[in-house]
Image (cartoon, helix red, strand yellow):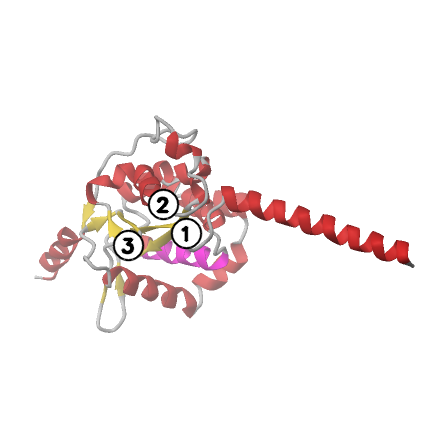
Amino acid sequence: MLFTMASSSSHRLVFFCLACLLFTFSYNFVAGESDKVKLNLYYESLCPYCQSFIADGLVKIFDSDLHTITDLKLVPFGNAHVSDKLTVTCQHGEEECKLNAIEACAIRTWPDPNVHYWFIRCIENDTTNWESSCFTKYGGKKAIKDCYTSDLSKTLILGYANQTLSLKPKHIYVPWVTVNGKPQYQHLDDFVAQVCKAYKGKASLPKICHSSALSKSPQSKVVKLQVSYAEEVFNHQAKNLN
């Protein structure tokens, strides 16, 4: 009996030590959720500049260890407009409204950015044939389509509209990027360095933050600063109504 108790106690001690080591290892390499840098992208699905930033820019987060300190949030609304009757009009027409809603449903289906980002990137890489290729590669067809064909998709989009239209300062163009709530303006194409600079957590900085080539990653390209101004969209819509 004494032997059994000692053995059990010894096992518990070993387990506790291993758990402490695992916790310490994880803490040193992965930032806690509260320590992560909040990187928000406000965009619209058919904006070519947004597509480029999603496909060739944001991929740096997941191609490297930057994801360990980054809390990425995608907000699919962009330069759209909401009428008094809660009708949403998108800059690039109905197809963009549809894809914005599909991507909102993907975020709802897979809350983890490391999952929904890849699905959304797949759409943005081929907005014509995305349905056959992206559902085949990543799944989620039933959940996303059920969401899209229900009132839930409109609720999600109106929620993203509220987030976008409530920005202070207001967004001027898309893609609109904020780091810990601060607009990046001319630093849009240098967001990796800005995330590294903004990180104040206790975990070690990702290796990419010490790299002399912050702009490089296996799947990424150089992202040039090109944007679509919100004011131009609203002025264009006003002219069409006159």
Mark 2 or mark 3, which has the lower sequence index? 3
Residue that badge 1 annotates: 35
Type of amino acid at the residue the image marks with label 3: Gly
Residue in the picture at 33% in, 31% down: 215
Span highlighted in magenta in the image: 97-109
| Whether label 2 touches label 1, CB < 8 Å | yes
The front one of 216 and 51 is 216
For residue 83, side relative to residue 215 (left or right): left
Question: Which numbered marker is on residue 199?
Answer: 2
Q: CA distance from mark 3 to mark 1?
A: 14 Å
Q: In the rendered image of this protein, does residue 153 appear above or below residue 182?
A: below
The front one of 193 and 166 is 193
Mark 2 or mark 1, which has the lower sequence index? 1
- Measured from the top left, where is residue 227 in percent x and y? 21, 43
Q: Residues within 10 Å of mark 3 (few under 14, many from 20)?
A: some
Query: Residue at the bottom extreme?
Result: 85
| Whether label 2 touches label 3, CB < 8 Å | no
Residue that badge 3 annotates: 181
